Image: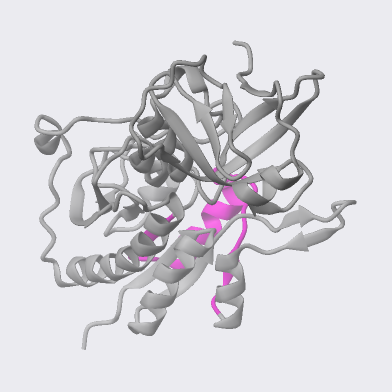
Amino acid sequence: MQEPLRIIFMGTPEFAVESLSRLVEAGCNVVAVVTMPDKAIGRHHDTLQPSPVKQYAVAKGIPVLQPERLRDEAFVEQLRALRADLQVVVAFRMLPEVVWAMPPLGTFNLHAALLPQYRGAAPINWAVINGETQTGVTTFFLDHDIDTGRIIHRVAIDIGPADTAGDVHDRLMHIGADLVVRTVRDIEAGTVAAVPQEQLAADTVLHPAPKLFRENTELRWSRHTAATAANFVRGLAPYPTAWTTLLTADGRRTQLKLFAATADADGTTATAAPGTIATDGAVLRVATAGGWLRVAELQLAGKRRMAAADFLRGARLDGARMEETPQ
């Protein structure tokens, strides 16, 4: 009887836990987990919080490795000693060649997009921000350049017009876990026929999916139509969220996070300057470069998340506007 593949799993967040748990439930031989070091939290950073993947692995009695540096020789030797046949990566760091090239059957990654589209750290968010109606998950073998290796399998899903990045994340987490198990089984059976991404790139519009920072999550009203602003908001919801600055008539500035918004249903074109606020006390609208954005849910800095109608009951917006950060 053939010995089951010895698998090392690498991942950190909840998205990765679903794939790891599905492998364990399928009876795969996960000999170790590699995840991020425990994170210091609390006011004084005196409490260490393990990653979701570590929490699951510890509960299941799976050995856990938490290297500070993936090139550290002691860590590399630990990996070699585990004699893994295959490594599976889901939502983890970029691996050096000494790590990804180690197992005889290679290392494959689960990517939350239909490669070669949306290479990068935030593929789910950027697909929604760009108004895509379809995305998916891809398993592919790692090689020298990020997200460019040979494709093993892809599974597509539709993105609904009201779907947030959080909605898409949750669906892909479950579909991706199924695909991880399927990919392991196919590698085990020797039935994989991986396809170079270059064969698909010619017929695909390639989009970057860079990591999200404060600078690229600000809603810049002068650069959006109402429709693209609505996509921007849902593509960053519920995390890290789109944000803007509320400038009051007396010059005070307060950051606002935007959790839900839609293009104004009447389809009118905003004639006011982008960032102009219009409200009747019940509805909050903001002018974009093309149309009005109707804000449905928001959060003032230091306050709770609330419906726009609740915000308006206590807000003084005469002469106020949304301001863009100078560049």
Q: Can residue 71 be seen in this view?
A: yes
Which of the two residues, 238 or 37, is positioned nearer the viewer here?
238
Residue 223 in magenta? no
User: Quadrant of the image for the N terminus?
Assistant: bottom left
In this view, which residue lies farthest toward the bottom?
1
Residue 64 in magenta? yes
Which span is picked out in magenta? Answer: 62-90
In this view, which residue lies farthest toward the front?
280
Give coordinates of residue 48: x percent, y percent.
77, 61
The residue depicted at 43 percent of the width and 50 percent of the height is 165
Image quadrant in which you'd find residue 117: top left
The residue depicted at 53 percent of the width and 34 percent of the height is 285
The residue depicted at 59 percent of the width and 45 percent of the height is 282
User: Quadrant of the image for the C terminus?
Assistant: top right
In this rendering, is residue 149 above or below 325? below
The answer to whether residue 63 is left or right of residue 119 is right
